[in-house]
Image (tube, helix red, strand yellow):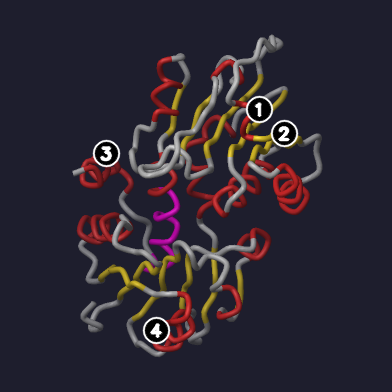
Amino acid sequence: MSGKLPFAQVIGDPIKQSKSPVIHGFWLEKLGLAAEYGKAHVQTQDLADYLTTSRTAQNWRGCNVTMPHKQAILPHLDSLDLLAERIGAVNTVVKQDDGSLRGFNTDVAGFLEPLSEVLAEKHLFRMARVLGTGGAARAIVAGLSDHGMVLVLAGRNPDKARSLINELAKQGDHHVATLDHFAEPTDFEFDDREGCFDIVVNASPLGMRGQPPLAFDFSHAPPGSIVYDIVMDPLETDFLRNAKDAGFRTIDGYSMLIGQAATAFELFFGQAPPREHDDELRERLTA
C-alpha cells in the first residue's frame, strides 16, 4: 500500500490464499475510486502491534480479519457491533472518525444474502441441518436462528454443538447430532414438505482441498432442500456435486465470500459495491 490513498487490508496467518484483494480491487476498479486494498501477513503475537501502528496511519480505513484472528482480535478493539459481540467473532475492523477501532461481523450478512428471497417468503416450518461447529458455524447458527429456523447442528463433539446452540440460537426445539449420523443412509420418510423450507449447510472445512471429504448421504435431505457449502477450494466440492446429481439446488462458497465482502466494502469506502458485475467478478476469482 502506498499510504497516500485511502486503503484497507485483510490480515491473517496464512494470508497468501486470501481472495479479498481480488474482490475489493475489482470493485474499486469498477467504481473508479481512488483507494487501495491489500493484504498483510500478521501472526498472533504481532496482532496488537499491527493495530497500534495501523490506527495511526492517516489513510488506513480498517481491515478484514481471517483465521486465526477472528476471536483473538476482540480484546484489542475499542467497541463491537452488537452482532459481533453476540457471535464473539470479528471479521471486519473499521477505524472510526475519532480514531477508535470498532469490530463488525459481516459473515452473517454474507451467508444469508443468497437466501434472502426464500427467507422473505412465509413458511409453515423451517429447518436447517448445519454441519460443523467452528467459527463459521457460529455466524451461520446465529443468522439462521434469527430467521426462525429450527436447527440440527452436527459436529464431532455433540457437547460442543449443544453449547453453541444454547449460546447463539434463539429459543426453539433445536437438536444436535454427530457428523457420523449423516454419513450413513436413512430410510426416514419425510412428511409433506409443501410450504416448508429446508437447508443443509456444510460449515466445516471438510471437503476443502487437503482436508478429508465430507461424508453425507442425501437420504437425510428433505425433498426441495437447498444445499449450501461455504468451502471455496474447490468451488464445486463433492458435497455440492452429489447434491446436484440428487436434484437439489446448490449454493457455493463464493456466494458467502462476495456477500460478506460487500458489507465490509461499504464500511471501508462509504459506497456500495457494483454488484451488477458479480458474474464477471466470479470469472476473475476463478481465473
Magenta highlight: main SS: helix
Quadrant where the image shows the C terminus? top left
Q: Nearer the viewer, residue 253 or 161?
A: 161
Kind of residue indicated by mark 1: His
The label shown at residue 54 is 4
Separation of marks 1 and 4 at Cα, in angstroms = 47 Å
Q: Amino acid at mark 4?
A: Ser
> In screen coordinates, is 220 left or right of 8?
right
Query: In the rendered structure, which amino acid carries the disc numbered 3?
Result: Asp
Magenta range is: 259-270
Task: Give the Cα separation between the discs numbered 2 and 3.
Answer: 33 Å
Residue at disc 1, secondary structure:
helix
Left or right: 183 as drawn, with respect to 278: right
* In front of the other: 246 or 249: 246
Task: Please tell me whether residue 274 is drawn above or below residue 282 in the rendered image.
Answer: below
Q: Residue at x 46, y 62 (%)?
A: 67
Pick whichever, 193 or 130, lies toward us.
Answer: 130
- Real-space Cα separation, disc 2 to disc 1, in angstroms: 18 Å
Q: Residue 176 in the image: x percent, y percent?
A: 73, 37
Of the numbered discs 3 and 4, the one sitting upstream in the chain is 4
Camera-side mark, 2 or 3 = 2
Q: Which residue is mark 1?
A: 181
Answer with mark 1 or mark 4, whichever residue precedes in sequence.
Answer: 4
Q: Quadrant of residue 158?
A: top right
Q: Which residue is mark 3?
A: 279
Which residue lies under the disc numbered 2? Answer: 150
How many C-alpha atoms fall within 10 Å of the one at disc 2: few (<14), some, or many (≥20)? many
Percent position of residue 280, x then y: 22, 42
> Residue 170 at x, y = what percent?
76, 46
Q: Distance from label 4 to label 2 (Cα)?
A: 42 Å
Q: Secondary structure at mark 2?
A: strand
- Residue under the image location 78 percent in, 49 percent down: 166
